[in-house]
Amino acid sequence: MEVCLFSFLLLLLLILLFAHAHCKSDIHLGYRVALAFPVEYSVGFIGRAFLMETNQMEPNFKAALSVEPIDGKYSCSLEVFLGDVKVWNSGHYSPFFTSERCVLELTKQGDLQLKGEKERVGWRTGTSGQGVEILKILGTGNLVLVDALNLTKWQSFNFPTDVMLRGQRLNVATRLTSFPTNSTAFYSLEIQYNKIALYLNSGRWNYSYWEFKPSKNRNITFAELGSKGLALFNDNHHKMAKISLSKRIHHPLGFLALGNKTGNLGLYFYSPDKQRFEAAFQALNTTCDLPLSCKPYGICTFYGTCSCIQFLTNEKGMGSDCSDGFSGGFCGRGEVEMRELYGVSSVLRAAPTKLNISKVACAKFCLQNCKCVAALYSSEELRECHLYGVVMGVKQVERGTRWTYMVKVQKGSHVGHENSGLKKWVLAMVGLIDSLVILLVFGGFAYYLIRKRRNNTATTADNTT
């Protein structure tokens, strides 16, 4: 145990010494660095060697070779940091898992590669034979491979992750993505021809929960992050609209990020006084407008707390998993029905839509699709029907709004039946009490008549005597 601990501390020391002794501004052909890590899996272990950094005031950009624990395995990746914030990762979409060591090599043919045990290649730029001479990091945080004429052959800006840096562009049909922990769904910021929008993606179902459109229905060609916000441009490179900061700041923006916990979009600047990045703008400012503010089948209330759907009328079982009994879906599970929830809507939009139909027909569409678990109906002019494959983003709203939210349940399900059972019990009690009252009234009246008749009989007898 002591030997393992000593080896582990020695490894960390070597990493730190390597990071400070070899950090440079660029890397040439033939460069190779290896990072070793413990054979046994350790949740708290992070191995990192900083390779390059920009010549700027703190916080500056740094490129690093990193090893991190993920789900019982070690991932090997090339990363870019702004201060202590990770702003790019080669394994964002597909982690490269390896054992024993993590190697970064810029081959003599000009291909940048990540390798594992037995020289197994897990990630590469695919630039072999293109005349690449140098890997360097620019003042914008962009990692680039350039040739002898300083022409870019590959750049990290072309492979966006969950962060957008100043000077970086996103063209139409490109996006940022972030992945919540322990969830099969993921968030995305998408650049489309007529808008930019935030989406929750779950299987084949995609739902928007925030969007921004240029005025006059003008088309977007690309979006670029500047020092004051995210600007939208047309085909002629004319700025059409901009998402600006919500408050005045005296420092330029650092980055735009799509949070993997909340799915919120934020513009962040560095505060020298607090020595950390702070949000100067957030797309969503209330908890209940976030897509995953509550668990599936949970409702975000006016107070920003979560309540399971079956608890709207009954406190029984508070604290259990809101999706109990529904996690397997409804395909092949017998007869189902739709239950309407009053004073409830959803922040999710852009589900498969039917137009100009009734609420009854909307419910029927969901019933006929075994993968549909909920429907949202609008009673306004278009009479929209949105179908859902998830019960998420549900929030409490004022009654009387134009939206009606309906949830699919199995016939005979306990959801909603606590209320009907409660009503039956209350009605039975009310009926019993009413019967007792009526019985007492009639009994008292009969007693009064009998007593009065006896008194009259006695009086008559006395008069006769």
Image (spheres, grey):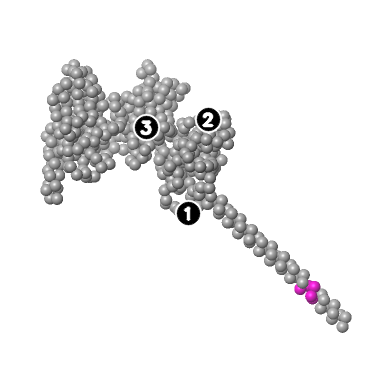
Q: Secondary structure at mark 3?
A: strand
Q: Which residues are magenta?
A: 451-455
Give how far across and how far down residue 282 sits, in percent.
Answer: 37, 36
Please state which amino acid type lies under the numbered disc 3.
Ser
108 on left or right of 152: left
Residue 354 makes an appearance in the image: yes
Q: Amino acid at mark 2?
A: Lys
- Within 10 Å of disc 2 (Cα), the crowding (few <14, some 14-19, many 20+) is some
Residue 7 x, y percent position in the rendering: 12, 44
Residue 412 is situated, as x and y percent measured from the top left of the image, at 53, 47
Q: Main secondary structure of the magenta part?
A: helix
Q: Which residue is mark 2?
A: 354
Residue at left offset 21%, top offset 29%: 121
CA–CA distance between discs 3 and 2?
A: 24 Å
Q: Quick check: is 378 in the magenta stretch?
A: no
Q: Which residue is mark 1?
A: 316
Q: Earlier in the sequence, mark 1 or mark 3?
A: 3
Depth check, mark 1 against mark 3: the one in front is: 1
Is 265 situated left or right of 72 in this image? right
Residue lying furthest right: 464
Q: CA separation, marks 1 and 2?
A: 36 Å
Three-letter amino acid code at the position of disc 1: Lys
Closer to the camera in the image, 348 or 245: 348
Secondary structure category for the residue under label 2: strand
The numbered disc on residue 427 is none
In this figure, which residue is indicated by the disc labeled 3? 188
Give the foreground label among 3 and 2: 2
